[in-house]
Image (tube, rainbow, N blue to C red):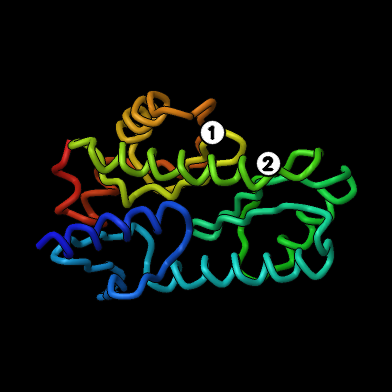
Amino acid sequence: MRSSLRCVGLVWALLATGWMSLSGCAPLIVGGAAVMGGMVASDRRTTGTVLEDEGIELKSASRIRDSLLERAHVNITSYNRQVLITGEVPSATDRQLVEKIVAGVENVRNIVNELEVMGNSTLTQRSSDALVTGRVRASLVDAQDLFANAFKITTERGTVYLMGRVTPREVKRATEVVSGTTGVQRVVRVLETLSEDDLARMQPAQAVKK
């Protein structure tokens, strides 16, 4: 029992920081839901869209790395084919180049460019951001009136970016929860809004959690 709980906790931490595998704790994907020790983490995207988002992130990162080499620190986060670009680049020209590269990737429908023209963040800063992401994820899990899996979280230099498909109530509540989390300096919402009726049609079981 202790091993099972420890495994689930580690999976949440890894999901928050972007790592998707851990020996002995690999999630089982069933119809777009990750099943871990009886816990079902449903996703408001279709399975096809989830795969497209993963492809967008991998292709964008690879092409950016080939073009900018080590002179920039760029993170790509895609949700429902909307791409958030965060990190640091040395010049405005590089900032534009990164956006152009991402725009050329298949299936991208929209780009939010949050790149800063400045020196690359340090490993210490990135580790701190990873911890903040973990705390935010834990805070959303602890909130009894939110579905943490409805949000995709990215943290850059203390700024937390929230992505997902959520209702106005969830937007307001999540902003309150995240803003009160230790280490969060600012919250940026890159969210798609659903009506309660839309959510009920998508996932009837989730619509009742208010």
Q: Residue at x 60, y 50 (%)?
A: 84
Q: Position of residue 146 (x, y in %)?
A: 25, 39
Where, by quadrant of the figure, is residue 133 drawn?
top left
Q: Which label was assigned to residue 188? A: 1
Q: Is residue 201 left or right of residue 181?
A: left
Identify which residue is drawn at 69% across, 44% down.
122
Instruction: Choose top left, top right, bottom left or bottom right for residue 107.
Output: bottom right
Q: Secondary structure at mark 2?
A: loop
The reply to whether the C-beta atoms of the residues labelled 2 and 1 are less than 8 Å apart is yes
| Residue in the foreground of this view, choosing between 18 and 153 | 18
Q: Quadrant of residue 144?
A: top left
Decide if residue 98 is on the left or right side of residue 151: right
- Which of the two residues, 142 or 204, is positioned nearer the viewer here? 142
Amino acid at circle 2:
Glu
Q: Earlier in the sequence, mark 2 or mark 1?
A: 2
Badge 1: residue crowd in 10 Å (few <14, some 14–19, many ≥20)? few
The amino acid beneath tag 1 is Val
- Residue 114: mark: 2
Determine the residue positioned at 47% across, 29% down.
183
- The N terminus lies in quadrant: bottom left
Q: Residue at x 69, y 46 (%)?
A: 87
Q: Residues within 10 Å of mark 2 (few under 14, many from 20)?
A: some
- Image spot of residue 51 (x, y percent): 47, 73
Looking at the image, is 54 positioned above or below residue 192? below
